[in-house]
Amino acid sequence: MSQPSPELRALLDATLAFYDGRAESFWAATRDHDVAQNREAVLSALGVGGPWTLLDLGCGPGRDLKAFAERGHRVIGVEAVARFVTMARAYSGCEVWQQDFLALDLPAGFFDGIYANASLFHVPRASLPLVLSELHGALRTGGVFFASNPRGAGEEGYREGRYGVLYDWPGWREVVSAAGFEELTHYYRPAGVSAEQARWIASVWRKA
């Protein structure tokens, strides 16, 4: 993966430092979040068969790593925050690679599915096409890519100490489609509210 500009590197580094300094409180606040719907979206798209080799991109302290592993899948985490890497390995018992989005080094055609829950929105907009290209290359043909991101209207910048891009659905669909992914479905979260009130957009894609 090519090296990002110093400006883009600084944006991500500040966000990683934010999480590193709040690792325990973040884990306490998110450990019991119910995102089973999102995990099931990946597995349903993969269909019958398995167990699957999955990548949890931005795995944090390891909540979803453990959940996938307990269902019999081989799941590998990628995480940039050093304290999260340690926590995820201990909590899940899974392999976790310390890499960040702007310096990914993933094996080509290796994964059946890539799961990016509440992580890719931290990638600066200018860097996202390159990151998606790396993910596309890491999937086998027919592999599944899942992403869930907070919803917005294209805003980009710092919010509460973290850098992020808040995509609307047309904007997210455009950039992911341009990376060579075929849309399977998308939905809004949390369940039980109208699309207009939903705070998250989840989408499932296939590498053709």
Image (cartoon, rainbow, N blue to C red):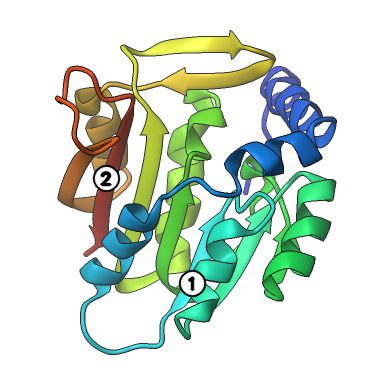
Which residue is tagged 2? 203
Q: Give the left or right position of residue 8, taking residue 192 as reference.
A: right
Residue type of the residue flagged with mark 2: Ser
Task: Check the picture and name the quadrant holding the C terminus.
Answer: bottom left
Going from the N terminus, do you reach mark 1 or mark 2 first? 1
The image position of residue 34, as x and y in percent, is 43, 49
Q: CA distance from mark 1 to mark 2?
A: 18 Å
Rendered residue at 19%/28% (across/down): 193
Camera sees residue 48: yes
Q: Give the left or right position of residue 22, taking residue 121 as reference.
A: right
Rendered residue at 53%/60% (across/down): 64
Where is residue 87, by image quadrant? Answer: bottom right
Rendered residue at 34%/23% (across/down): 151
Q: Give the left or right position of residue 91, taking residue 110 as reference.
A: right
Image height check: is 135 above or below 108? above
Which residue is tagged 1? 68
For label 1, the crowd category at 10 Å Cα-Cα, with few meaning under 14, some 14 to 19 and many 20 or more, is many
Camera sees residue 105: no
Q: Give the left or right position of residue 126, taking residue 48 as reference.
A: right
Mark 1 element type: helix
Q: Please tell me the numbered disc located at residue 208.
A: none
Where is residue 93, by image quadrant? Answer: bottom right
Mark 2 element type: strand
Residue type of the residue flagged with mark 1: Phe
The image position of residue 61, as x and y in percent, is 69, 53
**Foreground label between 1 and 2:** 1
Image height check: is 69 above or below 117? below
The image position of residue 141, as x and y in percent, is 30, 73
Image height check: is 97 above or below 153? below
